[in-house]
Image (cartoon, rainbow, N blue to C red):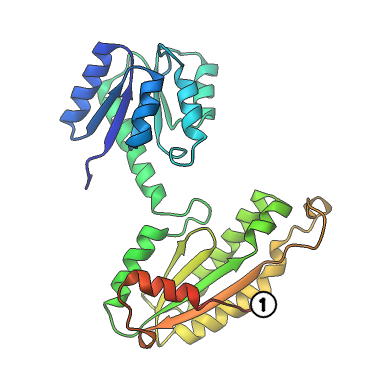
Amino acid sequence: MAEQACILVVEDERDTAEMLAAYFESQGYQVLQAAWGQDALKIIAHTLPDLILLDIRLPDMDGYEVCRRLRQQRRTQDTPIVFLTEKRERMDKLQGLELGAVDYITKPFDIQELRLRVRNALRRASFETLTDPVTALPAEPLVRERVSAALSKHDWALVGVGVAGVEAFGEAYGFVARDDALRAVALILSNVAQECGGEEAFVGQVGQTDFVLITDLEHVRDLRDRLATRLSQSVGYFYPLKEEGKPKLPGKRPEIKILLGVLGERSGPFADMDAALAAVHSSLRAVN
């Protein structure tokens, strides 16, 4: 790991807690400890760990309640939680997994197996932060990296794509239809970039509804025109066709608008990558 990952051990059995802390510190992790659920929540309030090893039987509240509270907060809703417990019943395990735990390990456990499970959970969490959970496109950290690299070259061009009206669309038709629409947009962008974006074309996502394509000046006009045509033709298919897919809310059908903008080397110079991304966003105009 490039950076030292932080593990919070929430365990009221002192010997077990100290053994886990000593072992994971020897593996290069930073380890925090809490013996009570409330203490764990206080620690997390000011220091967000990369992963939590959580006992279910705690003196003040059970681990399920700790997990439930963490999953209700945006800041901790995706923090990997691994339950460590003596509870072996199937329903106990299902309850833990239903609350959003990434793993459930019963005591006594094999420390080597636990190490591998922790490592794998951290790797999955790291990967998920680099891709959008809905479209699976590279997310902002990778987009910023690629845009920064593009700005250092000659003949670069960026195409910005925005999808306006998604929030109202989701309120009317539900989150499944909303996510399907965003995935459809992502697929179109990827296909068009592959068709005519050049050998080094890149597609990434910034936020929920903004996308960035990296290409060069030779391909940017064709790329932009094909996107405008393909996306405009596809918007009508984003709406559910069945009667049960009609808007849940009364009033006018929510309208999805596709926005496009183009930025090239000649549009600059830009002070940095943030300035370039801001300029791409400012260039967006409706095409349908």
Residue 39 in percent (x, y) is at 36, 22
Is residue 285 positioned above or below 46 on the image? below
Residue 174 drawn at (x, y percent): 69, 50
Where is residue 59? Give x, y as percent: 40, 11
Of the 4 image quadrants, the one containing the N terminus is top left
Q: Is residue 20 left or right of residue 235?
A: left
Q: Nearer the viewer, residue 192 or 122?
A: 122
* Residue 194 visible in the picture: no
The residue at the point 45 percent across, 70 percent down is 212
Q: Is residue 12 above or below residue 126?
A: above
Q: Residue at x 35, y 14 (%)?
A: 107
| Left or right placement of residue 89 versus residue 12 in this view | right
Q: Quadrant of residue 214?
A: bottom left
Q: Residue at x 37, y 48 (%)?
A: 127
Task: Reply above or below: 271 against 183.
Answer: below
- Dot 1 surroundings within 10 Å: few (below 14), some, or many (20 or more)? some
Q: Is residue 49 left or right of residue 263?
A: left
Q: Position of residue 249 (x, y in %)?
A: 78, 52
Q: Nearer the viewer, residue 111 or 217?
A: 217
Please indicate, yes or no, whether residue 117 appears anywhere in the rendered image. Answer: yes
Q: Which residue is mark 1?
A: 288
Given the image, on which type of amino acid does mark 1 rest?
Asn
Q: Nearer the viewer, residue 44 or 184?
A: 44
Q: Horizontally, is 52 left or right of 262 in the view? A: left
Give the quarter of the figure containing the C terminus: bottom right
- The total number of labels drawn is 1
